[in-house]
Image (cartoon, grey):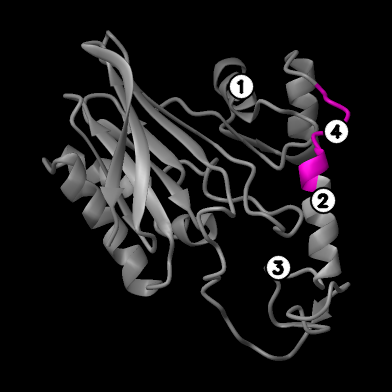
Amino acid sequence: MDVGAVGCLTNTKSAIAVAKAVMKYTKHTLLVGEKASRFAADMGLGWDSSLSSSMSESQYSEWKQKSCQPNFWENVTPDPSSSCGPYHPDNTTTSSIMDSIDIDNHDTIAMLAIDQNGDISSGTSTNGLNHKIPGRVGDSPIVGAGSYAMNGVGAAASTGNGDIMMRFLPAFHAVMMMQVGMDPLNALTTAMRPITQYYPMFRGAMIAVNQNGDYAAVCHGMESFDFCVANPTNRNVQVLTAKCV
């Protein structure tokens, strides 16, 4: 029940360290935007001049040359499927499932841990979707969506299309299912079910661990999902694979 989160950080590499500083040094839960970046600098967590790389700059140039495809605009003019904007509201009303989001479109890293005292923690960090609209915040820093942990029960975390996942708080859902006695696999399956029911084209995955160290992973919209496990009796990290539905 102790939380720290940040969103829309700029010029700061270690977002997870800034989130931990929010948890440790403030009474708040979530800081975002320019002031969150300033908070990071005040906490001595770096203020890098630029996080752009030659690869990211090349990707951006290619994206612009392809009329900014893909993007996440809809119901605007000019047509976002063939133009880079600037965009303005249109009177049409359509909605897409955003099925262009594949496993290479984002870079979420989630970790669940149980320490020697039995305390359970979770953490999630991401750069978000490629070509997202500036200001967009996904599920990673949203408590119960990106991850959730409860001592005496377990923890869960999510990756995939955060704009969809945050609507269902799947990490919270999975932990609540473990609290009433479900094992991690069934808890994850239960938490994933309403997402895939409403959004059949959804691509994503979840991991969970209970207080006993039992773990599982589930996924949807891809062939398989790799995740890593380590424990005190086997300190070598195991890379395991979950088959998706």
How far apart marks 3 and 1 lie (CA) works out to 30 Å
How far apart marks 2 and 3 lie (CA) works out to 17 Å
Q: Quadrant of residue 76?
A: bottom right
How far apart marks 3 and 4 lie (CA) works out to 23 Å
Mark 1 sits on what residue?
17
Mark 2 / mark 4, whichever is N-terminal:
4
Q: Nearer the viewer, residue 159 or 44?
A: 159
Mark 3 / mark 1, whichever is N-terminal:
1
Q: Is label 3 in contact with label 4 (beta carbons under 8 Å)?
A: no
Q: Kindly identify the amino acid type of the residue bearing the numbered disc 1.
A: Ala
Secondary structure under badge 2?
helix
| Nearer the camera: disc 2 or disc 4 | 2
Q: Quadrant of the C terminus?
A: bottom left
x, y (%) of residue 217? 28, 44
Residue 87 in the image: above or below residue 25: below
Residue placed furthest toward the top:
116
x, y (%) of residue 158? 41, 46
Q: Is label 1 in contact with label 4 (beta carbons under 8 Å)?
A: no
| Nearer the camera: disc 3 or disc 1 | 3
Q: Which residues are magenta?
A: 47-56
Mark 2 sits on what residue?
58
Q: Kindly identify the amino acid type of the residue bearing the numbered disc 3.
A: Asn
Mark 3 sits on what residue?
71
